[in-house]
């Protein structure tokens, strides 16, 4: 979704707004109206086609395959004792 008909200009504005959002969150979020400015930048990013928040804003995917089995981890040192 974008309000800009040119993909190149939309991409450039998305990158600029993403960088400004990263800088704002890193250095100025604690200011008096920090949250309001964050909302405005995020909304502008949504309008120019950058989505809601910059690309780094993804959550890690946790599944049972990624979580180590505690029983296996406890048995590893015991199996290495004889080596």
Image: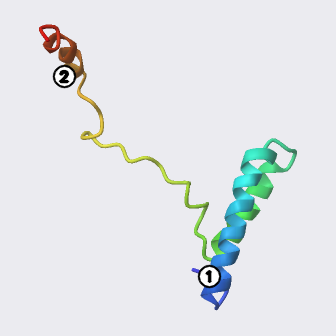
Q: Secondary structure at mark 2?
A: helix
Quarter of the C terminus within the rendering: top left
Q: Looking at this view, is 69 or 43 the one in front?
A: 69
Which residue shows up at 16% across the image and 8% down it? Answer: 81
How many angstroms separate mark 1 from mark 2 (CA)? 50 Å
Q: For this view, does 20 lie left or right of residue 66? A: right
Q: For this view, does 1 lie left or right of residue 34? A: left
Q: Residues within 10 Å of mark 1 (few under 14, many from 20)?
A: some
Residue 73 image offset from top left, x and y in percent: 24, 21
Q: Is residue 27 visible?
A: yes
Residue 82 image offset from top left, x and y in percent: 12, 8
Residue depth check, mark 1 versus mark 2: number of the one nearer the observer: 2
Q: Compared with residue 51, is residue 63 higher up or lower down, i.e. above or below?
A: above
Residue, disc 1: 2
Which residue shows up at 62% across the image and 82% down it? Answer: 2
Q: Is residue 48 visible?
A: no
Q: Compared with residue 13, is residue 9 higher up or lower down, i.e. above or below?
A: below
Q: Residues within 10 Å of mark 2 (few under 14, many from 20)?
A: few
Residue, disc 2: 72
Lower position in the chain sequence, tag 1 or tag 2: 1
Looking at the image, the residue that sits furthest to the front is 83
Q: Secondary structure at mark 1?
A: loop
Q: Looking at this view, is 7 or 52 the one in front?
A: 7
Which residue shows up at 70% across the image and 61% down it? Answer: 19
Q: Disc 1, disc 2: CB below 8 Å?
A: no
Residue 32 image offset from top left, x and y in percent: 87, 45
The image quadrant that residue 4 belongs to is bottom right
Quarter of the N terminus within the rendering: bottom right
Query: Mark on residue 61?
Result: none
């Amino acid at each position: 979704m974008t309000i800009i008909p040119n993909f190149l200009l939309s991409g450039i504005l998305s990158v600029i707004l993403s960088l400004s959002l990263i800088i704002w969150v890193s250095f100025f979020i604690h200011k008096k109206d920090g949250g309001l400015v964050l909302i405005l930048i995020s909304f502008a990013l949504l309008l120019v086609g950058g989505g809601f928040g910059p690309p780094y804003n993804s959550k890690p995917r946790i599944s049972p395959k990624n979580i180590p089995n505690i029983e296996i981890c406890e048995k590893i040192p015991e199996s290495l004792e004889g080596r």
